[in-house]
Structure formats: C-alpha cells, structure tokens
Amino acid sequence: MNNFAALPQALSSTFQNRLLHISSPLTWRGGEQQLWYLFQGLKNRGVDSLVFCPTGSELSKRLPDGQLITYKKRSGFDLSSAYKLKQVCTSKGIELIHVHDAHSHTMAVLASTLFGLKLPIVLSRRVDFPIGGSWFSRFKYNHASIKAVVPVSNAIASIIKPKLSSKHLKVHTIHSGVDLRRFENVVPADIKKELGLAESQPIIANVAALADHKDYFTFLDTVKLLHDSGCKASFVVFGTGPMESEIKAYCNQLELDQVVTFAGFRTDLPAVYPNIDVLLFTSKTEGLGTTILDAFASGVPVAATQAGGIPEMVIHNSTGLLAPVGDSETLCANVKSVLEDSDLRLKLTSNATSKVQEFTTDNMVFKTLELYQNILNKSFILKPV
C-alpha cells in the first residue's frame, strides 16, 4: 500500500514528458535498475517522462522509443552532448532535469554554464565515497541549478552535506527501493542442477558486480576460512565486472578454483535467490546495497559488512549479521552462525521480511515525485495503481 492518495490534486494534466532523466552508463547495474523503477513507477501513475542516455546502452534497450532520446557517449566531460542536452530541453519543453550519475551531473552543469540551460536539476548520489576535492567538483555540486541532492542512504548524506556550501541546496535522503512484486509467485531455478553443485550442500553466495568496491577479495578470504574449517557448502558468485580476471586469479591463488563457482550475470535473480542459504555481502564501500533488499524479499539470511548504507537495512542480530569491512574472520563466524542455528535464521528472515517494507519502489517513487512537486511548485494528477 502506498501514500499517493495523500498527494495534493491540482490541475496539471498537461505535465507530460516534461521530466527528463539523464543516465550515462553503458552497462546495467543498481543505478540503472533504480532509474528504471522510477521511470516505470511514474508512468504507471500517469506521469510520463523522457530519458536521455547513450546510444546502445543497456538502459536504452529497455525504454520505449517515444520516451527515449540518445546521444553518442564520448567522455565524462563532453561538450557536444551537453549542447545536445540543451537543444533537447528547449525543443521538448522540459521543466525539470533529474541526473542519476556523475557524468550526467557534469553534462547538465556544462549545459547550464556554457549553453544557457536554465532549468532546475535534481541530483541522485548513489556512492558513499567523498566528493572530489577539485575546484570543478566543488563547482558542480554547488551550482545554482542544483535544487536538491538525493542520496540513497543517510550514510551518503552525512558524507556530502559538509561539502555543500550553497545555502539554496537541500539534501533529501530517498532510499533505493525493491519491487516486491518481482518476488511473488516465483518458480525457483534449479541452480544446483544447472551448476553441477552438490544437492546436499547449502549455497553461500554473493550477488554483485565484480568491481573493486564490492571487495570480492574479502569474500574469497572468508570462503577460504569456511572451507578450511570444514564447512560443507557450495560457494557461488553471481555477477560479472571489470575486475573479473583479478578476482579469479586471487581465487586460484587461494586454491579455491575447485571450490568457488563463477556463475556470471543473471537476469532471473528472483528465481535464483530461493536457492541461496546465506548471502555473503562483503563490500568495502556501498551507497545502500539493493542486493540485500532482494535477499530480504526472498527470505534469504544476510551476513554483510558495515559499509556505507548497509546498516540502514541490516540491523545486527535482528535483520542480519554485520561485520567490520574487510573482517573475514567475523564474516566467517557469522555465516557459520546462520548455517548452524535454525532459530537465528528464522529470526533474521522474519525481521528482514518486515524491514524490507520500508524500502519499496512505491515509497521511492512517492518521495521522488513529492520532491519534484515541491521544486516546481505544482502537483500531478495521478492514476490509481
């Protein structure tokens, strides 16, 4: 159930395709998934928006032609794309821009500074590392066109607030959401048969990009401790990414090449999660970590690090178990506790099922739309869903 009925109802039925989302990644990861949820959530409620993203990007392949405008991505500092953005906003009558990543942020600020784009900008911030110290980083975060910064966790908000000097800027935490409908009436995949895993052994898995901040080195260190201590389990990695060769090399170095299965990128994760007995999530930085929300929605117990916004979801010994970043020994002990204590497993998954209700896509869309309305000083007529 959502709170959309509480939104003010004013005459604004002409406000269609006046919102422009900008996304720069070519790949599909958590940020693109959240943008997609937002785009669909708005559309389902009768508020159509446009998306400006690179030609050939994974996001562009999922969007309807009538609401998609593409550009050729050249670099993170791209004047031609900034100029095209200005032209698009003028021709389409755009009233509000929402930028969803750092390169999109740069593009919108360039369009405003160099090409006279005079529109309010909402900036999403999904990473929990500090804002850069260069003059341009300070300039673009405090640019007069930025009307709101939207971190996806309170942890990110606490990092960026000291760097925002402009008094007009407002910081509004809006947690990323999970679409709980994706996890209803799921037919589980037979992962053990598909990957040739032992039927009798539990699966301990991570579901994350093979990227530096996901810290798969700590994941493998934890697997090593579990395996060497006699833990009878199958260890599986679901994901691909830029550090795949380095991570697999480290796996071989630890002599775990016959122990860990690299299962690659999956598009059927709701069907995958019911096979997992423990999600071992070892990030060293993490804006929020929506993989954990997927696990909560699937009834999978979580052993994770305390990175970034993770403790806003994983309450230690209540909705999951936490360990310090990089602490493979505590992670190992936490995984063993989950595997060996059925009462603990039941408590964690039951509490997590309740906790995930705070992190739904409906809540995310509602809070974002409310922010748009406040900035534009106008309301939207919404369709019931």
Image: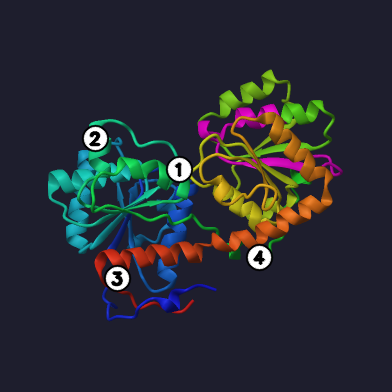
Q: Quadrant of residue 245?
A: top right
Q: Amino acid at mark 3?
A: Gln
Which range of residues does the magenta coloring cover? 195-222
Cβ atoms at labels 4 and 2 below 8 Å apart = no
Q: Nearer the viewer, mark 1 or mark 2?
A: 2
Asked where in the image residue 14 lies, by quadrant, the reply is bottom left
Mark 2: which secondary structure? helix
What amino acid is labelled 1 in the image?
Thr
Q: Which residue is mark 1?
A: 27
Disc 1 to disc 2: CB gap under 8 Å = no
What percent of the width, then of the height, locates residue 272?
Answer: 68, 51
Q: Nearer the viewer, mark 4 or mark 1?
A: 4
Q: Compared to 280, does 358 lie above or below?
A: below
Instruction: Report whether residue 17 is seen.
Output: no
CA gap between label 2 and label 3 equals 34 Å
Say few, some or many: other residues with alpha carbon within 10 Å of mark 4 (under 14 / 14 to 19 / 20 or more): few
Q: CA distance from mark 1 to mark 2?
A: 26 Å
What residue is shown at x 65% (from left), y 52% (from top)? 295
Q: Secondary structure at mark 4?
A: loop
Earlier residue among tags 1 and 2: 1
Q: Horizontally, is 301 left or right of 343 in the view?
A: left
Looking at the picture, which amino acid does disc 4 mark? Answer: Glu
Residue 135: percent from left, percent from top: 23, 32
Lower sequence index among marks 1 and 3: 3
* Residue carrying label 2: 136
Q: Residue at x 79, y 29 (%)?
A: 227
SS of the residue under disc 1: loop
**Of the image marks 2 and 3, the number of the one nearer the N terminus:** 3
Report, in whole angstroms, how far the alpha carbon at label 4 lies from the one at label 2: 46 Å
Which label is found at residue 16? 3
Q: Nearer the viewer, residue 271 or 145?
A: 145
**Residue bearing mark 4:** 184
